[in-house]
Image: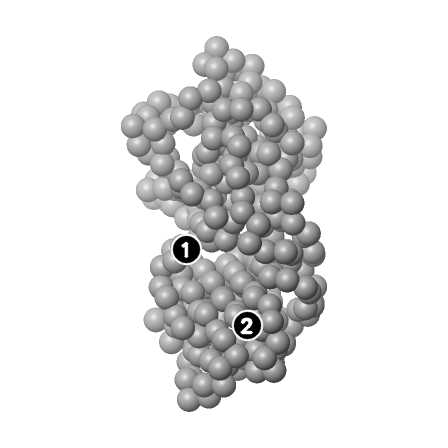
Amino acid sequence: MKKIQLIVADLLPPPDWAGELLAGLALPALEALLARGARADGTSTTLEAALCRAYGVSGGEPVAAVTAQADGLSQDGYWLRADPVHFLLQRDKIVALPTGGLASGEAAALVASLNQHFSADGLTFHAPHPQRWYLRLEAVPGLVTTPLSQVYGRDIRHLLPHGEDTLRWHRLTNEIQMLLHQHPVNEALEARGLRAVNGVWLWGGGVAGVALSQSFQSVCTDDALAGQFAQLAGLTDHAWPERWQPVEGAQLLVYGGLGEALQAGDWQAWRARIQSLERGYAQPLLAALRRGELARLEIKVLGSGGTASSHTLTPAAAWKLWRRGGLGRTVR
């Protein structure tokens, strides 16, 4: 019998929205899995942390070092993600928004300007992908960062990088904003009705050469970050099918579609996707447990705002019919 780990980001919506998002949804298999599994709280608070734990990464969450290598950046040193963002002033707060539609050539032009400006400071920016930018450093900075996935749509002032080098990095990010503000690429983006790239978000720092364990034989995911972890670990990476497909050996399933819908503020898409998760994954996984075809199913539930829980099921647990629950009660 095989073992499966399922990681679902933003399965639990923010409490203020939960009632509206969950109203009228019928999710019996998903709720049964969550109610009947042995629960542990707070094992991982973000998708980035959950992936690092799944691959046995120690010493923090060096996501940038992992994805840089997957993106073909093989130099030694310390890597930070420096992803392009749009900062928007809203009354008494500043929020970070995604920058869609940026072409590879436009990203290269923006990064070239950054490298020219900061060459004397020993900073080197890279853009192997329009939405994945990097900053390479020779030394480890005294910096604590927040993953970009936890920043979108929120007031950034309490999420900015901080630590021993706080003042230096705040000055640097301000310089970057001023440099990008009048860049011709941004004028072209705005002419196409797209958001300008008026800043970068630094996060996920780590030293090159991160080793990933191979606890799974295959990975199935719709998430680019999870796919890069699988790539670096040398695992077979399958696209996310409409319905769960059993494979040989231990399997890691990572679903990020709910988080994408929440970030876009698309409540209808979130409801449609969680119903698809119910039909295509929760129902067949519960049935497989009951038939004894799975030895162990671990579901890692990552909620908005940093909540997290882990639910571990065996075939016997799947038949504990007296255990009932609901996503609404789980949110509270």
Residue located at (66% from left, 41% from top): 101
Residues 152 and 215: in front is 215
Query: As shown in the figure, which amino acid type bears the numbered disc 2?
Result: Ala
Q: Residue furthest left?
A: 164
Q: Which label number is shown at residue 87?
A: none
Q: Which label number is shown at residue 44?
A: 1
Q: CA distance from mark 1 to mark 2?
A: 23 Å
Q: Is residue 268 above or below residue 43?
A: below
Residues 253 and 179: in front is 253
* 332 left or right of 227 in image: left
Any part of residue 23 in sight: no
Q: Position of residue 68 (x, y in %)?
A: 58, 34
Quadrant assignment, res 293: bottom right
Color style of the picture: one colour
Any part of residue 332 in sight: yes
Residue located at (35% from left, 22% from top): 168
Residue located at (47% from left, 22% from top): 137
Residue that mark 2 sits on? 295
Q: Residues within 10 Å of mark 1 (few under 14, many from 20)?
A: many
Residue located at (31% from left, 32% from top): 163
Q: Position of residue 120 (x, y in %)?
A: 48, 10
* 126 left or right of 199 in image: right
Q: Is residue 306 above or below residue 96?
A: below
Image quarter where the C terminus lies is bottom left
Which comes before the other along the chain, label 1 or label 2?
1
Q: Position of residue 141 (x, y in %)?
A: 38, 26
Q: Residue furthest front?
A: 1
Q: Is residue 254 above or below residue 33?
A: above
Quadrant assignment, res 105: top right
